[in-house]
Amino acid sequence: MTTEQPSPAQKRPGDTHFEVLLDGDPDDLVLQTAPVETPEITAQPQKAREERKPILPPSWHSWQGFKNWASYHAELTRYRLLYHSWRVPVIYAPLALLWSTVGLFKVAGRQIRWWWVLEQHGLRQEAATKNDAATWLLLHREARHARAWRGSVLAGELVATLTVLGLLWWPAPWWLQLLAAVAAVCALAHYGRPVDKPIVSAAVVVHRLRRLNPDIVLRAYYSAKLGDPDKAKVEFLSTMARDTLETGSHVHIALAHGRTFADTIKAKGALASGLDVSEFQVFLTRDRKSERSHFLFVADEDPLAIPAGRTDMLDCKPRDIWKPVRFGLDERGRRVEVPLMWNSVLVGAQPRKGKTFSARLLALHAALDPWVKLVVADGKNSPDWRKFTLVAHRIIFGTTANRDGDPVEMLVDALEEIKAHIIKVNEILSTLPVDVCPEGKLTRDLARDPRYPDLRVWTLVMEEFQVYFELEDQEANKRIASLLGFIISVGPSAGVNVLSSSQKPSGVGAGDVQRLFNRYRDNHAVRFALKCGNRTVSEAILGGDAYGEGYDAASLPMGPEYRGVGYLYGLTDETPTTRTHLADAADAEKILLAARRHREAAGTLSGYAAGEEAARQVRDVLADVVSVFLPGEDRLTWQTLAARLTDMIAEAYAGTTSEAISAQVRAFGVPSENVRDGDEVLKGCKLAAVKAAIARRDADRSGSGEQGPGNVVRARFGGSR
């Protein structure tokens, strides 16, 4: 993600009268190492410094800013042309003809008044009132001479006008006649119209924006009780400046000693009131170098209500999972990018706040990379993920059995396949030479090398993942929780990216299931929290430290214009308030159809999307337990069994727990008994009891004609299409 921290500008005392210099200029300092006999150096008065405006506009200081500026003015020009082109024949032309006629009569009347020397009428009337015959005759004589001269001037004007009209009427081309007529009508209409009734109306009403100044900022901080002008002054660590995209103003603020950034967060509403703006126009960013200082950014208008636009993936071109996703725009209009490789992303929010759309946007990027295998598990069984059947290697809908099978069993099989893939990737990477696999890590070249088909990147999508921790079958809960815990911990390093979403990120399950749920939730490196119902849910998504840093998703604005707005936490030191790009159902279908074509062309379509049936080997857990007993041992604790199975049969039991092994073995009627392990007495099982359970099971199966353990079972992954 690319974001810019407002850099403190050089302090210039001439900029504001609230500037506080922490150190004087070098010329003002007294040389401390000078001998005692040296005459005292008198500091020269500081010279006034002129304010130099930037050569280039601030919006041109970055390529993104210049593109925004050019795009804005191009769109504004296009709109103005469309606005006025429709009004020219319908409104402007009739008004121009009307007011040009009025203007013609006004010009003629003004010429006649000038010819008749009406400005002298008052003087002659005054002389007649005073019976001053000599003065009246003198004025009358001057008026006659003036009328004669002005009459000749008007006659010359009339002759010149008729001559020009004659030349335009006869020898001039039509376009020149039209141009002259338009110019004459425009001039007469401008002269004839009332001053308060313009003919051409404004296409865009420009609202006056309040430019912040230090007086307003100080007033806001003092009114919010964040300082006191006499005892606890607020200081400016930079000059007030406009941001490079011309969307607002920013400044570096230092509170009085003893005040913290947390105090500012609590007073954000009062601070916005003091600034006389909406709370959603005020953005506070922690200064990592000092607890009492922070960065204040005040937007000209609410930036979160401005849509970020549709996703660029609508071009349907292939994407690269090793490059970040263009996720949206932050509060200052800068692009926000999310790298999927080596990361796991958790998206949480209330219903209908954009949670699924945000998670699906990330998954669409992975789908457009034909070298990525997708596994999608939609716990809420909604239409939002149905079209991923076009590209998904494995896809599961809901928890209720359907014609394709039991979704819970399908999910367990899919997760076990991912787990086996992770183990295999780590084994392969450990055997590759350094020149092929530097630092023993997966690389882009290895993931696309046809010689290593097992090193493909995988993306696991878990929509409403809490559903799979709340199943009626407690053993399935534990198994899924154990597998997800292993994948979220080890998967990213093996090229398995996890995208999870949930509207219930806490209070799920009990005991070990709850512990594993919290472990899975908390191991997501990147969090995106949209509007939440309360602070507790926000902390469950973002983590406990987020609120102390000023990020509470419960305080995000409500309304349809704010869907897709949330805090992106954990990716960098900054936490931008992000407006995600939009990809609705129709956009998703278009992108996924293109993604399927890319996979078909690359020959990488697999699993459910390719119409393949998944073969799964059913493990005989009882036989596996017997195999780890050493000669002379007749009983083992569940902890020892879990450790040995993990070590000796890692491809099937890596990451398993003693509780999971106990549940699976006891399901066959093997009792859990006390077993001594050194000085401790723990629960475990006897070898004889396990063998007896195997004998009973085999006898039952042979009598019913069922297939024995270890057979290959064919299963169809996914829901009904």
Image (cartoon, rainbow, N blue to C red):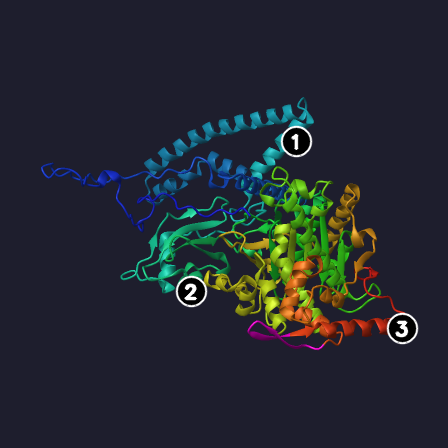
Distance (Cα) linking label 2 and label 3? 73 Å
Q: What is the crowding at mark 2: few (fewer than 14 residues within 10 Å), some, or many (at least 20)?
A: some
- 236 or 320: which is nearer to us? 320
Q: Mark 1 points at which residue?
A: 178
The answer to whether residue 420 is left or right of residue 117 is right
- 571 or 454: which is nearer to us? 454
Q: What is the crowding at mark 3: few (fewer than 14 residues within 10 Å), some, or many (at least 20)?
A: few
Labelled pair 1, 2 in contact (Cβ < 8 Å): no
Distance (Cα) linking label 3 and label 1? 101 Å
Amino acid type of the residue that numbered disc 3 sits on in the rendered structure = Ser
Span highlighted in magenta in the image: 671-683
**Residue 606 percent coordinates (x, y):** 78, 50
Q: What is the crowding at mark 1: few (fewer than 14 residues within 10 Å), some, or many (at least 20)?
A: few
At mark 2, the secondary structure is: loop
User: Which sits earlier in the primary sequence, circle 3 or circle 1?
Assistant: 1
Residue 39 vertical placement versus 518 (above, below): above
Q: Is residue 677 within the magenta segment?
A: yes
At mark 1, the secondary structure is: helix
Mark sitting on residue 704: 3
Distance (Cα) linking label 1 and label 2? 65 Å
Taken as a whole, is the magenta stretch helix, strand or loop?
strand
- Mark 3 or mark 1: which is in front? 3
- Mark 2 or mark 3: which is in front? 3
User: Which sits earlier in the primary sequence, circle 2 or circle 3?
Assistant: 2
Q: Is residue 696 within the magenta segment?
A: no
Q: Mark 2 points at which residue?
A: 267
Amino acid type of the residue that numbered disc 2 sits on in the rendered structure = Ala
**Quarter of the image holding residue 383?**
bottom right
Labelled pair 3, 1 in contact (Cβ < 8 Å): no
**Residue 221 percent coordinates (x, y):** 37, 60
Residue drawn at x 63%, y 52% is 581
- 535 or 409: which is nearer to us? 409
